[in-house]
Image: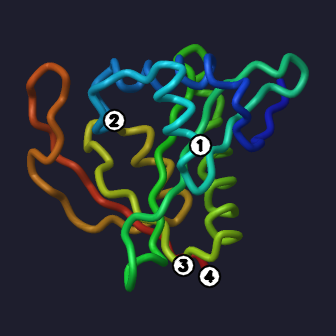
Amino acid sequence: MNYEVRKFENNDINEVNQIWNEVVEDGMAFPQIELLNTKTGLQFFNEQTYTGVCIEKETEEIAGLYILHPNNIGRCGHICNASYAVKKSMRGKHLGELLVKDCIQKAKEFNFRILQFNAVVAANISALKLYKKLGFAQLGKIPKGFLTKDGIYEDIIPHYIELN
């Protein structure tokens, strides 16, 4: 199978919401608690600096997505943040790497200088391995910084990479 990343389109909303909501329901990666519906999803994905979707070229099935947006404002507005989601049935195919690499390129196109992840959950071993492979630096650990849906507090590890 052959995959590519393209810009989110409004008619992607049902598939994109389903993938995003899978991650929210898992309760192990995103800070959000509320699930997206058509209205809130369209608003959310369209208000990002960029939303990218990963599709299988032959079938056009959406396999994953990412959102890219400023991490802060003003004097810290050159720092961006992103979140990634891959459909459960498509995990293990290195689509996360494809999404992160595309996101880095888009961040540069939008003149961001740093990509920062505020809350990588320490139990998310796949993400930690990928970010290390791609050259992200860890910024220490925030003990018990993430509340899982099971009520357990997990450590989070902020990361960043300069976008030279």
Q: Position of residue 84 (x, y in %)?
A: 51, 41
Tag shown at residue 29: 2
**Looking at the image, is 1 positioned above or below residue 68?**
above
11 to the left or right of 137: right
Image quarter of the C terminus:
bottom right
- Of the numbered discs 3 and 4, the one sitting upstream in the chain is 3
Q: Nearer the viewer, mark 3 or mark 4?
A: 3
Which type of secondary structure does the marked residue at label 1 adopt?
helix
Residue type highlighted by circle 3: Arg
CB contact under 8 Å: marks 3 and 2: no
Q: Which residue is mark 1?
A: 46
Q: Residue at x 62, y 65 (%)?
A: 107
Q: Residue at x 50, y 58 (%)?
A: 69
CB contact under 8 Å: marks 1 and 3: no
**Looking at the image, is 114 positioned above or below residue 155?**
below
- How far, Cα to Cα, is label 3 from label 4? 7 Å
Q: Which residue is mark 3?
A: 113
Q: Residue at x 47, y 45 (%)?
A: 83
Q: Which residue is mark 4?
A: 164
Q: Position of residue 103 (x, y in %)?
A: 62, 55
- How far, Cα to Cα, is label 4 from label 2? 28 Å
Residue type highlighted by circle 1: Asn
Which type of secondary structure does the marked residue at label 2 adopt?
loop
